[in-house]
Image (cartoon, grey):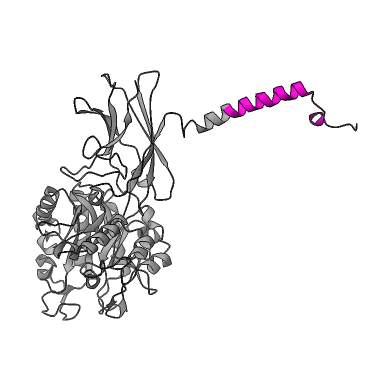
Amino acid sequence: MKDLPQIFLPIPMRRRLALLLAASVLGFVASARANNEAVGNWKNHAHAPEIAGIEENPLKGMIPYESGRKRSFPHSMEWFYVPLSAIQKGDEEFDWEPIERRLAEIAGRGNHSVFRVYLDYPGKPVGTPQYLIDAGVPMRSYTDAGNHNAASKSPDWNAPRLVAALESFISHFGKKYDGDPRIGFLTAGLYGFWGEWHNYPHDPEWEMKAGNRDRLLNAYRHAFAKTHVLLRNPMGTMNPELKTSFGYHDDSFAYETLRPEWAFVPRLQENGLLDSWKLKPIGGEIRPELQATIFDRWPNLPVKVERGAGENLAECLEATHATWMLNEHLFAAPLTDSQRKNALHAQRLLGYELQVTRSSIEWDERGNLCVKLKIKNAGVAPFYYQWPAEFAAYDPGAKETRVLGQATNWALPDILPDGREYQREFSATPTENLRGQRLLLRLVNPLKNGKPLRFANDRQDGDREGWLTLQDIPD
């Protein structure tokens, strides 16, 4: 036999069998360790995307205009406009009652508010503060853009006194309302027709200069660190840092969303913002002319409107990763069974859909209850706010629930709809015996009387409304 390296020399049969047996045992042990997470004491949880009540999940979905009327289609947010003239009485003088009243009414119905402050709404009374008009800010009359009665007037958007007043308003606005639990999202508003940052067809003559627009956006960026603010489109600024500081809203949704080249998605792409939804929310309004018929069929028919036709709603939702969409017709007119079914389908395609896929509960040597969860987002967008995760022990015999504590560091916005499971953990040191009890979970809505965030799981609301039942707590 030729000289061979030691590893290739013949091995006696008995020794060879012993080595194979040892290798098998080691392989089994390694496999068991590797699969302990998948089997071990982990419990699987079934996905249930149509669990009752999930269509009213907070901070997502179709939304109506605030009216106070009873609405039959499920929703968790309401929209309103308010003129700046009703709020700002001087450079440093503000009356917040018009906003406070609406926030209180909407929160009283368990809903969050989405709103915009404007100065020029075609067809409505002038929204520019009277003290600025009295101080000499030039005002322009017009009869197009729906302002046939010439009720509204457009201010000189580059008047120094006006720009400084808007900066002052934004600063005080943020001090008053940043992080307010009654507010879901804000749109930047203020400038342009309807606060949509354009004066078509009067631009570029009436256009606010780029430097002045950036002054407003910088004011918003510094004033609102918690509440998300959305812009009409990324062309409001050429500053890359400002472009990525805000969400965006498409107010011609499913009409000028995918095309032509100046539509919403192409503009996002042109500005490198197609993935902005991973950090900042996307919202908007289904084009008003489409709202009455868009849910007649699924997928919807491309109805002709003005110079074009409607677009495929499902494709628009997938491309934008939208979280909320204004659609007053859903709430103002009776729906057929088919329309309601199709609208509910679209409702579920908006925003996040959180599912607990697996859970593990153990006691450590110090008597701490240690919980691990795997969470998946089956929606199209993140949940954009950091709500605390609360755990409770439920006694099925006494039907009593005892809160064990909260996890406040779960980084919920990081749970992306990418097919991955994200692990989150919680631990507590109970002072009472939990034998025979079940562990429950909920994400705490900071809005008093707010609607519960339901997980897309079959045991959601299984023992207590608003809570997800995970599993029995081990002895």
Residue occupying the point 31% across, 63% down? 214
Residue 134: x %, y % from top left: 9, 69
> Across the whole image, how many numbered discs are drawn on residues?
0
Asked whether 330 or 111 is in front, the reply is 330
The quadrant in which residue 74 appears is: bottom left
Relative to 135, is 446 above or below?
above
406 relative position to 33: left or right = left
Outermost residue, right side: 1
In front of the other: 220 or 469: 469
Answer whether residue 421 is visible to the viewer in this image: yes
At horizontal 15% and vertical 64% (from top left) the residue drawn is 334
- Residue at the image position 20 percent from the left and 61 percent from the top: 116
**Which quarter shows the C terminus?**
top left
In front: 107, or 167? Answer: 107
> Is residue 419 toward the left or the right of residue 27 in the image?
left
For residue 350, above or below residue 410? below
- Quadrant holding the N terminus: top right
Q: Quadrant of residue 401?
A: top left
Horizontal and vertical percent position of residue 58: 24, 49
Per the picture, the main secondary structure of the magenta-coloured stretch is helix
Q: Is residue 14 magenta?
A: yes
Q: Tell me where the magenta segment starts and ends, as one range.
A: 1-28
Instruction: Examine the structure image and report whether residue 341 is included in the region drawn in magenta.
Output: no
Asked whether the viewer can see residue 219, the reply is no
Q: Position of residue 405 (x, y in %)?
A: 27, 30
Q: Is residue 447 above or below residue 162?
A: above
